[in-house]
Image: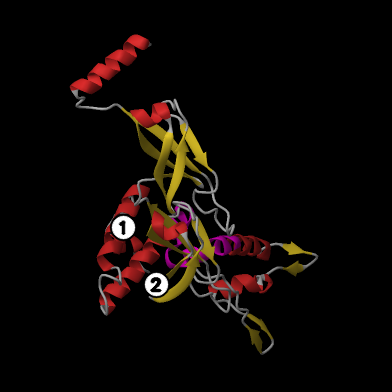
Amino acid sequence: MNFIDYYKILGIDKNASESDIKKAYRKLARKYHPDLNPNDKEAEKNFKNINEANEVLSNPEHRKKYDKHGKDWQHADDIERAQKQHNSSRQQGYQSYSGQSHTEDDFSDFFESMFGGQRTSGSRQSHNQVQFKGQDFNAELQLNLTDVYTNESQILTVNGKKIRLTIPAGIENEQVIKISGKGGPGVNGGPNGDLYITFNIVNNTKFKRYGNNLHANVDLDLYTSLLGGDIMVDTFSGKVKLKVAPETQNETKVKLKGKGFPIYKKEGEFGDFIITYHIQTPKNLTDKEKELFTTLQKLR
């Protein structure tokens, strides 16, 4: 496996901050995204390399291992463990106990498979292959709030591979889901890595979402707030008719149970829809209206 300079791929230096990495990745991902460069093999290759670089450098622990071990960063823990065992075995090789000396024949099979050594017994030789899990991948997916009100089917392109998935309704902004086995291939027959998807949910509605509840402001004319009446209100799933109680005060809140947002992975369950009334003062009053309000003022 050849060394790949992830810093060079993202166009940043080794002292780049997490924010610098994120900005560089997003800029390049937009530039080389397959949807914007159809049938462009070079753009597809660049997009794959950009994702791979981001997956490593955006994770502080992975980045630390990469800076120290380069192309072998995924096996950093095993390498360091094997090195400690190697050093320990070498020290013991120069000591004698009961007339016996410990030599490099005492190295573990694991160390030999990691560093290309081999054990011999007469003319017999054996190489033990150590299995490693493949690299985990990370991806970001942007959706509108209206997209996640119902189950959404999407096809993602991750490192040149198309992955079909169904996104459950009610997924949260910045929520991360794991798709097992959709990361990089394992080493020496080891299991594939996993794919982690972070969702960026853009609110393209007039409603505000807080968890499973939706909130909205509704303007109420002064006369209806005083005398009561029926009004039509927009919800996420359509209009509903509401009865306004007489003498409703400004900033009064009304809860419509079960008219909010779907609850993630709970089929048929919804949060609440909470309305806040904002009473509107009439403008451009006629002389007659002023006269009537003056009369009301004197009555009060």
Q: Residue at x 40, y 57 (%)?
A: 146
Quadrant of the drawing holding the C terminus: top left
What kind of colouring is applied to the model shown? secondary structure
> Left or right: where does residue 264 sit relative to residue 227?
right
**Horizontal and vertical percent for residue 155?**
41, 72
> Residue placed at 31% from the left, 50% from the top?
20
Q: 10 Å neighbourhood of mark 2: few (<14), some, or many (≥20)? A: some
207 and 25: which is toward the camera:
207
Label disc, if present, on residue 14 of the rendered structure: none
Q: Disc 1 marks which residue? A: 26
Task: Please report contact status of discs 1 and 2: CB closer than 8 Å, yes or no.
Answer: no
**Percent x, y of residue 8:** 29, 62
Relative height, residue 120 to residue 66 (above, below): below
Q: Earlier in the sequence, mark 1 or mark 2?
A: 1
Magenta residue check for 71: yes
Q: Which residues are magenta?
A: 60-81
Q: Quadrant of residue 289?
A: top left
Gap between marks 1 and 2 measured at Cα: 15 Å
Is 79 placed above or below 164 here?
Answer: above
**What's the amino acid at mark 2?**
Asn
| Image coords of residue 52 (percent x, y) | 39, 66
Q: Secondary structure at mark 1?
A: helix
Q: Is residue 122 left or right of residue 18?
A: right
Q: Which residue is mark 2?
A: 159
Structural crowding at the residue carrying mark 1, measured as other residues with C-alpha within 10 Å and reported as few (<14), some (14–19) or many (≥20): some
Query: For residue 196: magenta?
Result: no
Q: Residue 152: x and y, percent? A: 45, 65
User: Which is more toward the observer, 16 or 85?
Assistant: 16
Identify the residue at image location x=48%, y=52%. Answer: 172
- In terms of secondary structure, where does tag 2 sit? loop
